[in-house]
Amino acid sequence: MKMNTIYKGDCRKVLKDKIPDKSIDLIFADPPYNLSGNGLKWKNKGYGGDWHMVNEDWDKMSEAEYLQFTRGWLAECKRVLKSTGSIYISCTYHNIGELIMTLKLLGFTPRNIITWHKNNSMPSMTKRIFTHSCEYVLFFSKGKNWTFNYEELKKINPEKAKDGANKQMRDLWVMPVCQGKERLKNKSGRAAHPTQKPEELLKRIILASSKKGDVVLDPFLGSATTAVIAKKLGRKWIGIESEEKYVKIAQKRINES
Ligand SMILES: C[S@@+](CC[C@H](N)C(=O)[O-])C[C@H]1O[C@@H](n2cnc3c(N)ncnc32)[C@H](O)[C@@H]1O
């Protein structure tokens, strides 16, 4: 297995062919949520611009296909993780059930469900439900002696005690959806990747559950947020991405970081 490399392909096959048993310290996965629509566009209705639904072929499966897909990549993740390793998976209400059930059936142990409150989330377009403003990050360990850098997290926790002292980090993280300078744009000025995650999210996860020199793997690398932050924090990384256009964006971003 090559370090600091993007493997292009389906992560189920790449994991099987290239990544040895018990070789990875931490996995962050941001899988398809299986919520793509038909690209339905809401013209600007006073909410600060047009609104496009995620519309990607890799994000459209039947329920049965999605369960089978989830089981396939998660079983490989279990095999490649060290016994001290953890997996973090980002999700929404669309796929949290399938993920938790599969993780439990595979023998992972739940440690936290982190709620990411997106304080710049879009308003509800249909006005028939509460406004969605949260995603979740599942934190499961493979064994009983998982790495957890409690003191490091206290240092970077923006919440302080009344006397200004560092505080334990809670499982509620408030941060905006990736925007501004951090958001990669294509030539026409639109987001280069539809689901780019905030760097702060990856910083907390990587600092919490890996040490310098450890290997961090992301089976759904996208625009390479995980690789960029792993590199910045002195970790080795491996990314897997199936789409050529995103491999190119990711490699450029890593080279420039
Ligand atoms: C939700 S996005 C990840 C975004 C990433 N966290 C970021 O910050 O840019 C999922 C990515 O997985 C890729 N993908 C979808 N199915 C895949 C598969 N079976 N194997 C590898 N990559 C896949 C998609 O092309 C997409 O870029």
Image (tube, grey):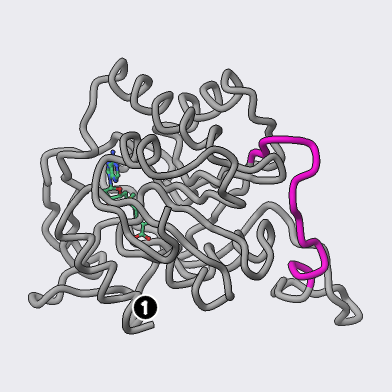
Residue 126 position, x and y percent, is 26, 41
Task: Point out the residue furthest to the right here.
Answer: 163
How many marks do you count on the picture?
1
Residue under numbered circle 1: 182
Looking at the picture, tell me which residue is in the foreground, 187 or 257: 257
Looking at the rendered structure, the secondary structure element under dot 1 is helix
Position of residue 187 in the picture relative to residue 68 (left or right): left
Identify the amino acid type marked 1.
Glu
**Residue 69 within the segment the image draws in magenta:** no
Range shown magenta: 140-154
Q: Residue at x 48, y 46 (%)?
A: 90
Residue 181 position, x and y percent, is 34, 83
- Vertical arrangement, residue 168 with respect to residue 127, above or below: below
Position of residue 32 in the picture relative to residue 234 (left or right): left
Binning the other alpha carbons within 10 Å of mark 1 as few (below 14), some (14 to 19) or many (20 upward) gives: few
Question: Quadrant location of residue 194?
Answer: bottom left
Quadrant where the C terminus sits is: bottom left
